[in-house]
Amino acid sequence: MTQADGTGVRTLGARYQELLNRLIVGINVCVREVGSMLLLAGQVFYYGLRPPYRFAQIFLQMRLIGVQSLFIVVLTGIFTGMVFALQSGRAFRLFNAESLTGAVAGLSLARELAPVLTALMVTARAGSAMAAELGTMRVTQQVDALEAMAVHPVNYLVAPRVFATVLMLPLLAAIFNFVGALGTYVVGVMLLRIDEGIFLYNIRWYVDIEDLVQGFSKAICFGFVLAVVGCYKGLHATGGAKGVGIATTSAVVIASVAILVGDYFLTALLF
Amino acid sequence: MIRIENLYKSFGQLQVLKGINLEVPKGKITVIVGRSGQGKSVLLKHIIGLLKPDSGEIYVDDKLITRMSANELNRVRRRCGMLFQDAALFDSMDVFDNVSFPLVEHTALDEEEIAARVARTLALVDLYNVESKWPAELSGGMKKRVGLARALVLEPEIMLYDEPTTGLDPITSAQINQLIIDTQRRLQMTALVISHDMTSTRQVADQVVMLHAGEIVEAGDVDSFFNSNEPAVLQFLKGEAQGPLGESERNHAS
Protein backbone atom coordinates (compact mmCIF):
# COMPACT_ATOMS: atom_id res chain seq x y z
CA MET A 1 0.00 0.00 0.00
CA THR A 2 2.79 2.40 0.88
CA GLN A 3 4.47 1.59 -2.40
CA ALA A 4 1.51 2.82 -4.43
CA ASP A 5 1.91 6.27 -3.02
CA GLY A 6 5.12 8.17 -3.87
CA THR A 7 5.95 9.48 -0.40
CA GLY A 8 5.74 5.97 0.99
CA VAL A 9 8.36 4.76 -1.46
CA ARG A 10 10.58 7.69 -0.60
CA THR A 11 10.34 7.13 3.15
CA LEU A 12 10.99 3.43 2.63
CA GLY A 13 13.98 4.36 0.48
CA ALA A 14 15.18 6.83 3.10
CA ARG A 15 14.86 4.19 5.76
CA TYR A 16 16.94 1.73 3.75
CA GLN A 17 19.43 4.49 3.10
CA GLU A 18 19.70 5.17 6.82
CA LEU A 19 20.08 1.49 7.60
CA LEU A 20 22.75 1.19 4.93
CA ASN A 21 24.58 4.21 6.32
CA ARG A 22 24.53 2.74 9.79
CA LEU A 23 25.81 -0.55 8.45
CA ILE A 24 28.66 1.22 6.66
CA VAL A 25 29.58 3.16 9.81
CA GLY A 26 29.47 -0.09 11.80
CA ILE A 27 31.70 -1.93 9.33
CA ASN A 28 34.02 1.06 9.26
CA VAL A 29 34.39 0.99 13.04
CA CYS A 30 34.93 -2.79 13.04
CA VAL A 31 37.60 -2.66 10.36
CA ARG A 32 39.38 0.16 12.16
CA GLU A 33 39.28 -1.71 15.50
CA VAL A 34 40.62 -4.91 13.98
CA GLY A 35 43.27 -2.94 12.12
CA SER A 36 44.41 -1.19 15.32
CA MET A 37 44.55 -4.51 17.16
CA LEU A 38 46.68 -6.04 14.40
CA LEU A 39 48.92 -2.99 14.58
CA LEU A 40 49.33 -3.51 18.33
CA ALA A 41 50.06 -7.20 17.69
CA GLY A 42 52.85 -6.12 15.33
CA GLN A 43 54.17 -3.61 17.83
CA VAL A 44 54.38 -6.37 20.46
CA PHE A 45 57.09 -8.02 18.35
CA TYR A 46 58.72 -4.75 17.31
CA TYR A 47 59.00 -3.24 20.79
CA GLY A 48 58.98 -6.47 22.80
CA LEU A 49 61.90 -8.14 21.02
CA ARG A 50 64.29 -5.21 21.41
CA PRO A 51 66.03 -3.94 24.52
CA PRO A 52 65.32 -3.17 27.26
CA TYR A 53 64.05 -6.73 27.83
CA ARG A 54 61.48 -6.95 30.60
CA PHE A 55 62.22 -10.32 32.17
CA ALA A 56 61.11 -9.23 35.64
CA GLN A 57 57.82 -8.00 34.21
CA ILE A 58 57.35 -11.20 32.21
CA PHE A 59 57.92 -13.38 35.30
CA LEU A 60 55.57 -11.22 37.34
CA GLN A 61 52.88 -11.58 34.68
CA MET A 62 53.51 -15.32 34.36
CA ARG A 63 52.70 -15.58 38.04
CA LEU A 64 49.59 -13.41 37.78
CA ILE A 65 48.30 -14.98 34.57
CA GLY A 66 49.55 -18.56 34.93
CA VAL A 67 50.10 -19.57 38.53
CA GLN A 68 47.12 -17.68 39.87
CA SER A 69 44.81 -19.20 37.24
CA LEU A 70 45.82 -22.69 38.31
CA PHE A 71 43.02 -23.28 40.76
CA ILE A 72 40.24 -22.23 38.42
CA VAL A 73 41.74 -24.25 35.55
CA VAL A 74 42.01 -27.38 37.71
CA LEU A 75 38.46 -26.94 38.94
CA THR A 76 36.95 -26.44 35.47
CA GLY A 77 39.15 -29.21 34.06
CA ILE A 78 38.01 -31.84 36.55
CA PHE A 79 34.33 -31.06 36.14
CA THR A 80 34.57 -30.84 32.35
CA GLY A 81 36.15 -34.31 32.27
CA MET A 82 33.59 -35.69 34.70
CA VAL A 83 30.52 -34.41 32.90
CA PHE A 84 31.97 -35.46 29.56
CA ALA A 85 32.44 -38.99 30.81
CA LEU A 86 28.96 -39.02 32.30
CA GLN A 87 27.25 -37.90 29.08
CA SER A 88 29.31 -39.88 26.59
CA GLY A 89 29.44 -42.96 28.82
CA ARG A 90 25.68 -43.12 29.00
CA ALA A 91 25.32 -42.51 25.26
CA PHE A 92 27.92 -45.15 24.38
CA ARG A 93 26.25 -47.63 26.70
CA LEU A 94 23.20 -47.55 24.40
CA PHE A 95 25.20 -49.51 21.83
CA ASN A 96 27.62 -51.22 24.21
CA ALA A 97 30.60 -49.07 23.32
CA GLU A 98 31.24 -47.47 26.70
CA SER A 99 34.85 -48.62 26.64
CA LEU A 100 35.41 -45.85 24.09
CA THR A 101 34.45 -43.18 26.65
CA GLY A 102 38.04 -42.58 27.72
CA ALA A 103 39.32 -42.30 24.17
CA VAL A 104 36.61 -39.89 23.06
CA ALA A 105 37.02 -37.75 26.16
CA GLY A 106 40.80 -37.78 25.78
CA LEU A 107 40.61 -36.74 22.14
CA SER A 108 38.08 -33.99 22.82
CA LEU A 109 40.10 -32.69 25.73
CA ALA A 110 43.39 -32.66 23.86
CA ARG A 111 42.10 -31.09 20.66
CA GLU A 112 39.30 -28.77 21.76
CA LEU A 113 38.18 -28.63 25.36
CA ALA A 114 41.51 -28.00 27.03
CA PRO A 115 42.73 -25.13 24.82
CA VAL A 116 39.32 -23.49 24.36
CA LEU A 117 38.04 -23.70 27.92
CA THR A 118 41.43 -22.79 29.40
CA ALA A 119 41.58 -19.76 27.10
CA LEU A 120 38.06 -18.73 28.09
CA MET A 121 38.85 -19.06 31.79
CA VAL A 122 42.07 -17.10 31.43
CA THR A 123 40.20 -14.45 29.43
CA ALA A 124 37.71 -14.09 32.24
CA ARG A 125 40.42 -13.96 34.90
CA ALA A 126 43.48 -12.36 33.33
CA GLY A 127 42.26 -10.78 30.09
CA SER A 128 39.72 -8.74 32.01
CA ALA A 129 42.37 -7.79 34.57
CA MET A 130 44.67 -6.57 31.79
CA ALA A 131 41.95 -4.35 30.33
CA ALA A 132 40.99 -2.99 33.75
CA GLU A 133 44.56 -2.37 34.89
CA LEU A 134 45.82 -0.74 31.70
CA GLY A 135 42.51 1.11 31.37
CA THR A 136 42.91 2.61 34.83
CA MET A 137 46.50 3.52 34.01
CA ARG A 138 45.33 5.18 30.82
CA VAL A 139 42.55 7.29 32.37
CA THR A 140 44.73 8.37 35.32
CA GLN A 141 47.50 9.48 32.91
CA GLN A 142 49.94 6.80 34.12
CA VAL A 143 50.42 5.64 30.54
CA ASP A 144 51.16 9.24 29.51
CA ALA A 145 53.62 9.51 32.40
CA LEU A 146 55.35 6.36 31.20
CA GLU A 147 55.66 7.79 27.68
CA ALA A 148 56.80 11.16 29.01
CA MET A 149 59.59 9.29 30.82
CA ALA A 150 60.71 7.88 27.46
CA VAL A 151 59.46 4.35 28.09
CA HIS A 152 57.31 2.81 25.38
CA PRO A 153 54.04 1.43 26.84
CA VAL A 154 54.08 -1.53 24.43
CA ASN A 155 57.59 -2.45 25.55
CA TYR A 156 56.86 -2.03 29.26
CA LEU A 157 53.18 -2.94 29.64
CA VAL A 158 51.87 -4.87 26.64
CA ALA A 159 54.71 -7.14 25.48
CA PRO A 160 55.38 -8.73 28.90
CA ARG A 161 51.67 -9.52 29.29
CA VAL A 162 51.40 -11.02 25.81
CA PHE A 163 54.60 -13.07 26.13
CA ALA A 164 53.60 -14.32 29.58
CA THR A 165 50.14 -15.36 28.38
CA VAL A 166 51.56 -17.13 25.30
CA LEU A 167 53.99 -19.03 27.53
CA MET A 168 51.50 -19.93 30.25
CA LEU A 169 48.43 -20.90 28.26
CA PRO A 170 49.81 -24.16 26.77
CA LEU A 171 51.00 -25.16 30.25
CA LEU A 172 47.59 -24.44 31.73
CA ALA A 173 45.98 -26.36 28.86
CA ALA A 174 48.25 -29.31 29.63
CA ILE A 175 47.13 -29.25 33.25
CA PHE A 176 43.51 -28.96 32.09
CA ASN A 177 44.13 -32.00 29.90
CA PHE A 178 45.53 -34.02 32.76
CA VAL A 179 42.92 -33.21 35.37
CA GLY A 180 40.20 -33.51 32.72
CA ALA A 181 41.37 -37.06 31.97
CA LEU A 182 41.45 -37.71 35.70
CA GLY A 183 37.83 -36.55 35.96
CA THR A 184 36.88 -38.84 33.10
CA TYR A 185 38.62 -41.71 34.83
CA VAL A 186 36.84 -41.08 38.13
CA VAL A 187 33.40 -41.04 36.52
CA GLY A 188 34.10 -43.64 33.82
CA VAL A 189 35.86 -46.29 35.87
CA MET A 190 34.55 -45.68 39.35
CA LEU A 191 31.00 -44.56 38.67
CA LEU A 192 30.05 -46.13 35.32
CA ARG A 193 32.12 -49.27 36.06
CA ILE A 194 33.91 -49.31 32.74
CA ASP A 195 36.80 -51.76 32.76
CA GLU A 196 39.90 -49.87 33.87
CA GLY A 197 42.34 -51.69 31.57
CA ILE A 198 40.30 -51.12 28.42
CA PHE A 199 39.56 -47.54 29.41
CA LEU A 200 43.25 -46.66 29.77
CA TYR A 201 44.32 -48.71 26.74
CA ASN A 202 41.82 -46.89 24.55
CA ILE A 203 43.02 -43.49 25.71
CA ARG A 204 46.61 -44.43 24.85
CA TRP A 205 45.61 -46.01 21.55
CA TYR A 206 43.43 -43.18 20.23
CA VAL A 207 45.10 -40.06 21.59
CA ASP A 208 48.28 -39.32 19.62
CA ILE A 209 50.97 -36.80 20.23
CA GLU A 210 49.60 -34.88 17.19
CA ASP A 211 46.34 -34.33 19.05
CA LEU A 212 48.20 -32.81 21.97
CA VAL A 213 50.32 -30.66 19.65
CA GLN A 214 47.16 -29.43 17.96
CA GLY A 215 45.72 -28.43 21.33
CA PHE A 216 48.88 -26.68 22.50
CA SER A 217 49.25 -24.78 19.21
CA LYS A 218 45.71 -23.54 19.63
CA ALA A 219 46.41 -22.54 23.22
CA ILE A 220 49.37 -20.44 22.05
CA CYS A 221 47.22 -18.68 19.43
CA PHE A 222 44.39 -18.07 21.91
CA GLY A 223 46.81 -16.73 24.50
CA PHE A 224 48.18 -14.25 22.01
CA VAL A 225 44.69 -13.13 20.97
CA LEU A 226 43.28 -12.74 24.48
CA ALA A 227 46.30 -10.79 25.73
CA VAL A 228 46.43 -8.46 22.72
CA VAL A 229 42.69 -7.79 22.95
CA GLY A 230 42.84 -7.19 26.72
CA CYS A 231 45.80 -4.81 26.42
CA TYR A 232 44.35 -3.03 23.39
CA LYS A 233 41.04 -2.38 25.11
CA GLY A 234 42.84 -1.18 28.23
CA LEU A 235 45.16 1.19 26.39
CA HIS A 236 42.23 2.67 24.47
CA ALA A 237 39.94 3.20 27.46
CA THR A 238 38.53 6.70 27.76
CA GLY A 239 36.43 8.60 30.25
CA GLY A 240 37.06 7.43 33.79
CA ALA A 241 35.58 4.53 35.72
CA LYS A 242 32.77 3.98 33.22
CA GLY A 243 35.21 3.82 30.35
CA VAL A 244 37.34 1.27 32.17
CA GLY A 245 34.22 -0.82 32.80
CA ILE A 246 33.28 -0.71 29.13
CA ALA A 247 36.84 -1.58 28.11
CA THR A 248 36.89 -4.59 30.45
CA THR A 249 33.53 -5.91 29.27
CA SER A 250 34.33 -5.55 25.60
CA ALA A 251 37.77 -7.11 26.09
CA VAL A 252 36.17 -10.24 27.55
CA VAL A 253 33.41 -10.38 24.92
CA ILE A 254 35.70 -9.78 21.94
CA ALA A 255 38.39 -12.18 23.14
CA SER A 256 35.86 -14.94 23.92
CA VAL A 257 34.16 -14.62 20.54
CA ALA A 258 37.53 -14.47 18.77
CA ILE A 259 38.64 -17.63 20.56
CA LEU A 260 35.51 -19.59 19.62
CA VAL A 261 35.39 -18.36 16.02
CA GLY A 262 39.14 -18.66 15.65
CA ASP A 263 39.00 -22.21 16.96
CA TYR A 264 36.81 -23.29 14.05
CA PHE A 265 39.00 -21.69 11.43
CA LEU A 266 42.24 -22.91 13.01
CA THR A 267 40.86 -26.46 13.05
CA ALA A 268 39.53 -26.23 9.51
CA LEU A 269 42.61 -24.63 7.98
CA LEU A 270 45.53 -26.11 9.89
CA PHE A 271 44.57 -29.57 11.09
CA MET B 1 64.58 26.74 24.13
CA ILE B 2 61.21 25.62 22.88
CA ARG B 3 59.72 27.17 19.75
CA ILE B 4 56.15 26.52 18.64
CA GLU B 5 55.07 27.55 15.16
CA ASN B 6 51.52 27.71 13.89
CA LEU B 7 50.25 24.79 15.94
CA TYR B 8 46.76 23.50 15.13
CA LYS B 9 44.97 20.64 16.84
CA SER B 10 41.38 19.38 16.70
CA PHE B 11 39.63 16.50 18.41
CA GLY B 12 36.79 15.52 16.09
CA GLN B 13 34.78 18.67 15.44
CA LEU B 14 36.30 20.56 18.34
CA GLN B 15 39.20 22.80 17.40
CA VAL B 16 41.37 23.11 20.51
CA LEU B 17 44.49 24.91 19.29
CA LYS B 18 44.16 27.50 16.54
CA GLY B 19 47.57 28.55 15.34
CA ILE B 20 49.78 28.86 18.42
CA ASN B 21 53.08 30.72 17.98
CA LEU B 22 55.22 30.77 21.09
CA GLU B 23 58.84 30.92 22.19
CA VAL B 24 59.77 29.57 25.60
CA PRO B 25 63.13 31.12 26.48
CA LYS B 26 65.95 28.93 27.81
CA GLY B 27 66.58 29.00 31.54
CA LYS B 28 63.43 30.95 32.35
CA ILE B 29 60.04 30.10 33.83
CA THR B 30 57.15 30.65 31.46
CA VAL B 31 53.64 30.38 32.87
CA ILE B 32 50.68 29.67 30.62
CA VAL B 33 47.45 30.93 32.13
CA GLY B 34 43.85 30.74 30.97
CA ARG B 35 40.48 29.34 31.87
CA SER B 36 39.92 25.60 32.10
CA GLY B 37 39.35 23.82 28.82
CA GLN B 38 41.18 26.35 26.64
CA GLY B 39 43.87 23.96 25.44
CA LYS B 40 46.66 24.57 27.96
CA SER B 41 47.23 20.90 28.83
CA VAL B 42 46.87 19.94 25.17
CA LEU B 43 49.64 22.39 24.33
CA LEU B 44 51.86 20.91 27.03
CA LYS B 45 51.25 17.37 25.80
CA HIS B 46 52.38 18.41 22.32
CA ILE B 47 55.69 19.67 23.66
CA ILE B 48 56.59 16.27 25.10
CA GLY B 49 55.20 14.44 22.07
CA LEU B 50 52.22 12.78 23.76
CA LEU B 51 49.99 14.35 21.12
CA LYS B 52 50.72 14.94 17.45
CA PRO B 53 49.56 18.24 15.95
CA ASP B 54 47.28 18.42 12.92
CA SER B 55 49.67 21.00 11.51
CA GLY B 56 52.46 23.21 12.76
CA GLU B 57 55.90 22.60 14.20
CA ILE B 58 57.55 22.37 17.60
CA TYR B 59 61.30 22.78 18.01
CA VAL B 60 63.14 21.83 21.16
CA ASP B 61 66.64 23.30 20.96
CA ASP B 62 66.20 23.72 17.20
CA LYS B 63 65.32 20.05 16.77
CA LEU B 64 61.97 19.49 15.11
CA ILE B 65 60.18 17.08 17.46
CA THR B 66 56.85 16.93 15.66
CA ARG B 67 58.25 14.72 12.90
CA MET B 68 60.65 12.58 14.89
CA SER B 69 60.71 8.79 15.06
CA ALA B 70 59.75 7.24 18.40
CA ASN B 71 63.40 6.57 19.29
CA GLU B 72 64.55 10.10 18.52
CA LEU B 73 61.63 11.50 20.47
CA ASN B 74 62.56 9.35 23.46
CA ARG B 75 66.06 10.86 23.41
CA VAL B 76 64.49 14.33 23.70
CA ARG B 77 62.07 13.14 26.41
CA ARG B 78 64.96 11.93 28.55
CA ARG B 79 66.01 15.57 28.94
CA CYS B 80 62.49 16.58 30.01
CA GLY B 81 60.58 16.13 33.23
CA MET B 82 56.85 16.46 33.52
CA LEU B 83 54.63 16.89 36.55
CA PHE B 84 51.10 15.72 35.75
CA GLN B 85 47.94 17.33 37.03
CA ASP B 86 47.09 14.48 39.42
CA ALA B 87 50.74 13.45 39.73
CA ALA B 88 50.05 10.23 37.72
CA LEU B 89 52.09 8.09 40.10
CA PHE B 90 52.26 4.40 39.21
CA ASP B 91 49.86 2.96 41.77
CA SER B 92 51.29 -0.54 41.41
CA MET B 93 54.62 0.73 42.78
CA ASP B 94 55.62 2.25 46.11
CA VAL B 95 57.12 5.73 46.38
CA PHE B 96 60.68 4.46 46.07
CA ASP B 97 59.98 2.55 42.86
CA ASN B 98 58.09 5.53 41.45
CA VAL B 99 60.91 7.99 42.07
CA SER B 100 63.66 5.58 41.07
CA PHE B 101 61.84 4.56 37.87
CA PRO B 102 63.59 7.05 35.55
CA LEU B 103 66.97 6.18 37.09
CA VAL B 104 66.42 2.45 36.66
CA GLU B 105 65.25 2.98 33.08
CA HIS B 106 67.81 5.47 31.84
CA THR B 107 70.96 5.26 33.94
CA ALA B 108 73.46 2.55 34.83
CA LEU B 109 73.64 3.52 38.51
CA ASP B 110 73.90 0.72 41.05
CA GLU B 111 71.33 0.14 43.79
CA GLU B 112 73.14 2.17 46.44
CA GLU B 113 73.54 5.18 44.21
CA ILE B 114 69.91 4.97 43.18
CA ALA B 115 68.77 4.78 46.81
CA ALA B 116 70.93 7.76 47.71
CA ARG B 117 69.68 9.79 44.79
CA VAL B 118 66.03 8.95 45.56
CA ALA B 119 66.46 9.98 49.20
CA ARG B 120 68.18 13.20 48.11
CA THR B 121 65.46 14.08 45.62
CA LEU B 122 62.70 13.30 48.12
CA ALA B 123 64.45 15.52 50.67
CA LEU B 124 64.49 18.25 48.03
CA VAL B 125 60.67 18.15 47.97
CA ASP B 126 60.59 17.94 51.77
CA LEU B 127 59.58 14.29 52.08
CA TYR B 128 61.28 11.94 54.49
CA ASN B 129 60.77 8.22 55.23
CA VAL B 130 58.01 7.79 52.67
CA GLU B 131 59.90 5.41 50.36
CA SER B 132 57.86 2.36 51.33
CA LYS B 133 54.46 4.08 51.21
CA TRP B 134 52.01 3.42 48.39
CA PRO B 135 50.50 6.26 46.33
CA ALA B 136 47.04 5.45 47.71
CA GLU B 137 48.31 6.23 51.22
CA LEU B 138 49.49 9.74 50.33
CA SER B 139 47.62 13.04 50.55
CA GLY B 140 47.13 15.15 47.41
CA GLY B 141 50.00 17.46 48.30
CA MET B 142 52.34 14.55 49.01
CA LYS B 143 51.42 12.90 45.72
CA LYS B 144 52.29 16.09 43.85
CA ARG B 145 55.61 16.28 45.64
CA VAL B 146 56.42 12.63 44.88
CA GLY B 147 55.45 13.33 41.25
CA LEU B 148 57.76 16.32 41.32
CA ALA B 149 60.58 14.22 42.77
CA ARG B 150 60.07 11.62 40.02
CA ALA B 151 60.21 14.34 37.37
CA LEU B 152 63.31 15.96 38.90
CA VAL B 153 65.32 12.85 39.71
CA LEU B 154 67.13 12.86 36.34
CA GLU B 155 67.82 16.60 36.71
CA PRO B 156 66.11 17.50 33.43
CA GLU B 157 66.96 20.52 31.31
CA ILE B 158 63.31 21.18 30.56
CA MET B 159 60.56 20.91 33.15
CA LEU B 160 56.86 20.91 32.36
CA TYR B 161 54.36 21.48 35.15
CA ASP B 162 50.66 20.82 34.54
CA GLU B 163 48.78 22.77 37.22
CA PRO B 164 51.28 22.14 40.02
CA THR B 165 49.27 23.90 42.73
CA THR B 166 45.68 23.12 41.77
CA GLY B 167 43.76 21.54 44.65
CA LEU B 168 46.42 22.21 47.26
CA ASP B 169 46.14 24.28 50.41
CA PRO B 170 47.79 27.73 50.30
CA ILE B 171 50.81 26.69 52.33
CA THR B 172 51.57 23.59 50.27
CA SER B 173 51.02 25.72 47.14
CA ALA B 174 53.57 28.25 48.36
CA GLN B 175 56.02 25.43 49.09
CA ILE B 176 55.56 23.99 45.61
CA ASN B 177 56.05 27.43 44.07
CA GLN B 178 59.25 27.87 46.03
CA LEU B 179 60.37 24.44 44.83
CA ILE B 180 59.73 25.41 41.23
CA ILE B 181 61.79 28.58 41.65
CA ASP B 182 64.59 26.88 43.60
CA THR B 183 65.04 23.95 41.25
CA GLN B 184 64.94 26.24 38.23
CA ARG B 185 67.69 28.43 39.73
CA ARG B 186 69.77 25.47 40.82
CA LEU B 187 69.61 23.54 37.56
CA GLN B 188 69.12 26.51 35.21
CA MET B 189 66.28 24.62 33.59
CA THR B 190 63.74 25.85 31.12
CA ALA B 191 60.37 25.59 32.80
CA LEU B 192 56.87 25.76 31.46
CA VAL B 193 54.07 25.98 34.01
CA ILE B 194 50.34 25.70 33.41
CA SER B 195 48.35 27.49 36.03
CA HIS B 196 45.24 29.43 36.79
CA ASP B 197 46.53 30.41 40.17
CA MET B 198 47.41 34.11 39.88
CA THR B 199 49.29 34.27 43.19
CA SER B 200 51.63 31.52 42.14
CA THR B 201 51.98 32.98 38.64
CA ARG B 202 53.12 36.30 40.09
CA GLN B 203 55.52 34.42 42.34
CA VAL B 204 57.23 32.12 39.85
CA ALA B 205 56.85 33.57 36.35
CA ASP B 206 59.49 35.28 34.25
CA GLN B 207 57.15 35.34 31.29
CA VAL B 208 53.36 34.93 31.16
CA VAL B 209 51.30 33.72 28.23
CA MET B 210 47.53 33.81 28.23
CA LEU B 211 45.67 31.23 26.21
CA HIS B 212 42.01 31.55 25.36
CA ALA B 213 39.86 29.48 23.01
CA GLY B 214 42.97 27.96 21.45
CA GLU B 215 44.70 31.27 20.74
CA ILE B 216 47.28 33.34 22.55
CA VAL B 217 45.66 36.59 23.69
CA GLU B 218 48.62 38.03 25.58
CA ALA B 219 52.29 37.23 26.03
CA GLY B 220 54.97 39.17 27.79
CA ASP B 221 57.14 39.41 30.88
CA VAL B 222 55.46 39.14 34.25
CA ASP B 223 55.22 42.89 34.96
CA SER B 224 53.78 43.80 31.61
CA PHE B 225 51.22 40.99 31.95
CA PHE B 226 49.97 42.15 35.32
CA ASN B 227 49.79 45.75 34.04
CA SER B 228 48.18 44.79 30.76
CA ASN B 229 45.20 46.76 29.44
CA GLU B 230 43.94 43.88 27.31
CA PRO B 231 40.28 43.38 28.36
CA ALA B 232 40.58 39.59 28.47
CA VAL B 233 43.61 39.77 30.76
CA LEU B 234 41.91 42.36 32.98
CA GLN B 235 38.85 40.15 33.33
CA PHE B 236 40.99 37.12 34.14
CA LEU B 237 43.08 39.00 36.72
CA LYS B 238 40.03 40.44 38.44
CA GLY B 239 38.12 37.18 38.21
CA GLU B 240 34.95 38.77 36.81
CA ALA B 241 32.06 36.71 35.50
CA GLN B 242 31.21 39.19 32.71
CA GLY B 243 33.66 40.06 29.99
CA PRO B 244 35.28 38.92 26.74
CA LEU B 245 36.32 35.54 28.21
CA GLY B 246 32.85 34.70 29.50
CA GLU B 247 31.21 35.64 26.25
CA SER B 248 33.54 33.67 24.11
CA GLU B 249 33.05 30.71 26.42
CA ARG B 250 29.36 30.85 25.54
CA ASN B 251 30.16 31.11 21.85
CA HIS B 252 32.58 28.25 22.28
CA ALA B 253 29.86 26.10 23.85
CA SER B 254 27.32 26.81 21.14
Image (spheres, coloured by chain):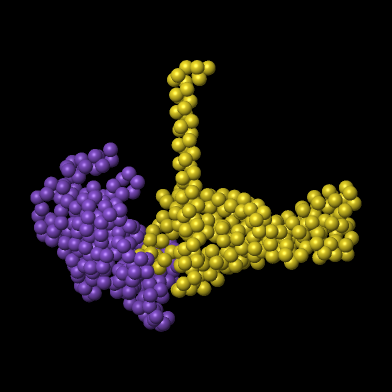
Asked whether residue B251 is in view, the answer is: yes
User: For this rendering, which residue is in front, A213 or B99?
Assistant: A213
Q: Is residue A53 above or below residue B36?
A: below
Side of A134 where B173 appears, left or right? left
Side of B56 where A262 appears, left or right? right
Q: Is residue B250 above or below residue A227?
A: above
Q: Quadrant of residue B220?
A: bottom left
Asked whether residue B204 is in view, the answer is: no
Chain B image colour: purple
The mark total stands at 0
Q: Position of residue B63 (x, y in %)?
A: 26, 68
Q: Position of residue B112 (x, y in %)?
A: 41, 82
Q: Position of residue B82 (x, y in %)?
A: 31, 65
Q: Position of residue B38 (x, y in %)?
A: 26, 50
User: For this rendering, which residue is in front, B14 or B116?
Assistant: B14
Side of B165 where B131 appears, left or right? right
User: For this rendering, which residue is in front, B199 or A158?
Assistant: A158
Side of B151 where A14 appears, left or right? right
Q: Quadrant of residue B47?
A: bottom left
Residue at (21%, 63%) from the top-left corner?
A: B3
User: For this rendering, which residue is in front, A227 or B123?
Assistant: A227
Q: Quadrant of the C terminus of chain A?
A: bottom right
Residue at (21%, 73%) from the top-left corner?
A: B188
Q: Which chain is yellow?
A: A
Residue at (39%, 59%) from the top-left corner?
A: A141
Residue at (52%, 73%) from the top-left corner?
A: A55
